[in-house]
């Protein structure tokens, strides 16, 4: 993608014949952090578009009443790799996170769960229970890192996590430059054995793509820097999926 952004002429990857029908339970990825604006929806939509362009039958489940993932999906060209949307925040039984599973097609192989800010307590625990692994985006500022530290503690202490430990990955988002602030976060994550997977720089590519219902994976030609930054994230995800399948 050029810095000039998304244009009407941009070529999209469209692989209608590449669909793989999964015979196993769908893989469910939870994108969460108690902080707003750290990139949960950006991660969720980009990961969903990655899965869809890989031929996976993909659903994005939006628990945020702001409905940003659903807005993203409604801006998405119907000719692109298809993604099912579930507005889980609507008509939701507040005590259940499981109702969404009734609303995704039975052949769905990948489910991405986008969540609201302020996630805590039993709702957080239920969402952890309803997922296979967790991605936590963090903006490398002192305030965000402190909030993320508290959130990670909440995750580790939740009933669902203690009953059934899930892989967790932290990614840094909107990184302007590699700052010393990382060291604090890195030390904390190292002490907990949580991998710090990758950093995504601050770029308008995400902003422009999101306005058009696109993820970076929808572009045939991706910016080399974006590709490099996404590589460790996608490798980690694929690794978790293959580990899960072996279980
Ligand atoms: N790496 C990035 N570079 C530039 N802008 C970004 C990046 N990640 C997210 N944004 C923008 O920041 C805003 C908040 O991101 P969003 O994904 O909606 O956060 P959340 O869902 O956690 O509230 C959005 O306008 C989004 O386009
Ligand atoms: Mg959001």
Image: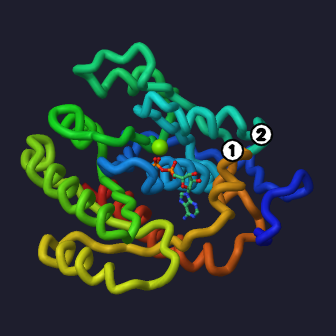
Res 110 visible? no
**Horizontal side of residue 121 vs 7, given as left or right:** left
Compare marks 1 and 2 and give the one earlier in the sequence: 2
Q: Residue furthest right?
A: 9
Q: Which mark is residue 213?
A: 1
Percent position (x, y) of residue 16? 74, 44
Q: Is the CB of the residue bearing disc 1 within 8 angstroms of ligand 1? A: no
| Quadrant of residue 28 within the rendered picture | top left
Judging from the image, what secondary structure is the residue with disc 2 in?
loop
Res 102 visible? yes
Q: Which residue is mark 2?
A: 77
Q: CA distance from mark 1 to mark 2?
A: 7 Å
Percent position (x, y) of residue 25? 37, 39
Q: Do callouts 1 and 2 mark residues in contact (Cβ within 8 Å)?
A: yes
* Label 2, residues with CA under 10 Å away: few <14, some 14-19, many ≥20: few
Check the image and report above or below for 222 versus 8: below
* Label 1, residues with CA under 10 Å away: few <14, some 14-19, many ≥20: many
Percent position (x, y) of residue 67? 52, 32
**Horizontal side of residue 182 vs 192, given as left or right:** right
Instruction: Residue at 58% x, 56% y: name it.
Output: 50
Check the image and report above or below for 71 versus 180: above
Question: Which is nearer the eye, 242 or 230?
Answer: 230
**Horizontal side of residue 160 vs 123, given as left or right:** left
Instruction: Residue at 17% x, 74% y: name it.
Output: 188
């Amino acid at each position: 993608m050029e810095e000039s952004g998304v244009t009407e002429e941009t070529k999209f990857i469209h692989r209608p014949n590449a669909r793989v029908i999964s015979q196993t339970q769908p893989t469910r990825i939870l994108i969460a952090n108690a902080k707003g604006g750290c990139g949960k929806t950006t991660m969720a939509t980009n990961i969903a578009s990655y899965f869809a362009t890989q031929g996976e039958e993909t659903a994005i489940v939006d628990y945020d009443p702001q409905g940003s993932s659903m807005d993203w999906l409604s801006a998405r060209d119907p000719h692109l790799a298809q993604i099912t949307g579930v507005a889980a925040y609507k008509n939701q039984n507040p005590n259940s996170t499981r109702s969404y599973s009734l609303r995704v097609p039975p052949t769905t192989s990948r489910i991405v769960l986008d969540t609201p800010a302020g996630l805590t307590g039993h709702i957080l625990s239920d969402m952890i229970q309803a997922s296979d692994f967790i991605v936590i985006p963090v903006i490398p500022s002192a305030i965000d890192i402190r909030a993320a530290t508290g959130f990670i503690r909440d995750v580790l202490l939740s009933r669902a996590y203690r009953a059934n430990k899930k892989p967790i990955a932290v990614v840094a988002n909107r990184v302007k430059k590699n700052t010393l602030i990382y060291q604090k976060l890195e030390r904390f994550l190292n002490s907990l054995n949580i991998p710090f997977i990758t950093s995504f720089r601050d770029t308008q590519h995400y902003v422009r793509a999101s306005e058009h219902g696109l993820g970076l994976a929808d572009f045939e030609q991706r910016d080399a820097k974006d590709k490099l930054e996404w590589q460790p994230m996608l490798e980690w995800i694929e690794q978790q999926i293959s580990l899960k399948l072996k279980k």
